[in-house]
Amino acid sequence: MLTIGTELLIGDTINTNASSLGKLLVNKGLELNHELCVRDSKEDIESGLDFLIKYNSAVIISGGLGPTEDDITKNSLSLITGIPLIEDTVHIENMKKLWKKRGYEMSKLNIKQALIFENFNKIKNTIGTALGCHFIYEDTDIYVLPGPPREFIPMVNDYVLPSLISKNDAESVIYKYVSLYGIPESSLADKITEFKPDNLDLAFLPSKGVVKIRYDALKISSQDERLFLENISDNFKNNIINYSNESIIETLSNELKLKRKSVSFIESITGGSLASSITSYPGATKIFKQAHIMYQDSSKKSYLDSESLESDWKLLSTRLMEEFMHKSSSDIYLVVLGEAGPISSSNNKVGTVIVVVSDGNNVQLTEHYFTGDRKYIIKRTVNQCFFELLKIIR
């Protein structure tokens, strides 16, 4: 992949296309071997392309297809390859109609977004106005796509992936995953070394309490894979999130839907992050009922109709849970209190977190202590809450 854009290198824009492309490719048994990011400069584009075509059978280029003067990708590629650009008149007419529908007259600058390489394929853009292109250079397939992710991803799915699959007879990788929670990466690796197959290379991907183990299923026999997964289950049965590349919230959402259970939250330290996370997935209305964000003590006093609060967070969170279950109707309830810092606003140390979950009958309280900065503690708390919910519904 060759990503073009000075804005990516100076931090104005985050390059999410690279990670998205890597996931899309590996799900089809293909691998992203290199990812280079260069400035909006013909010289940099040329040096990046020269390097990539030496080692790859296909290069996917992203960015620089807009109408302004800094969008130089197609013109630069034409000069580098010697392949002339021509205007796609059909696309120009479609753009004019689109601008008219918006109540504007199309600028002449937009015509450059209809340029394609002579005698090669165009790649339709169903979201935006910049046409993509597919051409062959130095026996390498070159796919040129716009930078905005909402345009880039559909064009990869609609055109690039089918094209790449048609040119590859066999899968180069089949990555599989096991996700676990609450075990330090080093401890997990030490234990797994005792039983993993000798020819199996593992990658450990830790993130805020979650550790994903990735392996290539093509590198081992089905029998060795089965024994490996059985050992994982036997040794870490209380820590397993899933046997996939799903996030913890995806797994929780899917299991709630499968079991037709609804959840409700009282959030303090997480400030609405639990509700935001669960509603970011389709079908949330079937599993999520409500959330109360009680950040200041005054909101907790008001909810409890009390002039004072217990200083012991275990007692306070239990009291909030009792009131929550009395006032609300849900299948699963969760209350979370915590101190994210950087300076404590209570008698509790920064990093202290209390999570209480209930299925209406059983109430389970767990206490945790997380280290790190404010953002890390909050994100770690979110994952802890989701894992506690997974445990109570399983």
Image: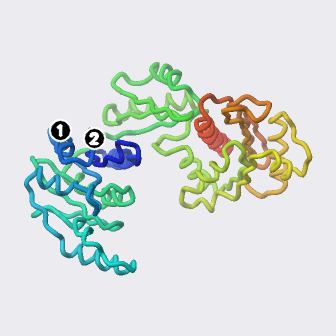
Q: Give the quarter of the image for residue 365.
A: top right
Task: Judge by depth and name the residue closer to the eye, 350 or 259.
Answer: 350
**Image mark for residue 51:** 1
Q: Mark 1 belongs to which amino acid?
A: Phe
20 in relation to 151, above or below: above
195 in relation to 326, above or below: above
Task: Judge by depth and name the residue closer to the eye, 40 or 260.
Answer: 40
Relative to 302, is 42 on the left or the right? left
Residue at 19 percent of width and 65 percent of height? 115
Q: Secondary structure at mark 2?
A: strand
Q: From this viewpoint, is residue 323 visible?
A: yes
Q: Position of residue 343 (x, y in %)?
A: 70, 32
Q: Residues within 10 Å of mark 2 (few under 14, many from 20)?
A: some
Q: Position of residue 35 (x, y in %)?
A: 29, 41
Residue at 34 percent of width and 48 percent of height? 21
Q: Position of residue 39 (x, y in %)?
A: 27, 45
Instruction: State the residue position of label 2.
Output: 36
Q: Are marks 1 and 2 in contact (CB under 8 Å)?
A: yes
Q: Residues within 10 Å of mark 1 (few under 14, many from 20)?
A: few
Q: Secondary structure at mark 1?
A: helix
Q: Give the quarter of the image for residue 241.
A: top right
Q: Quadrant of the N terminus?
A: top left
**Image mark for residue 294:** none
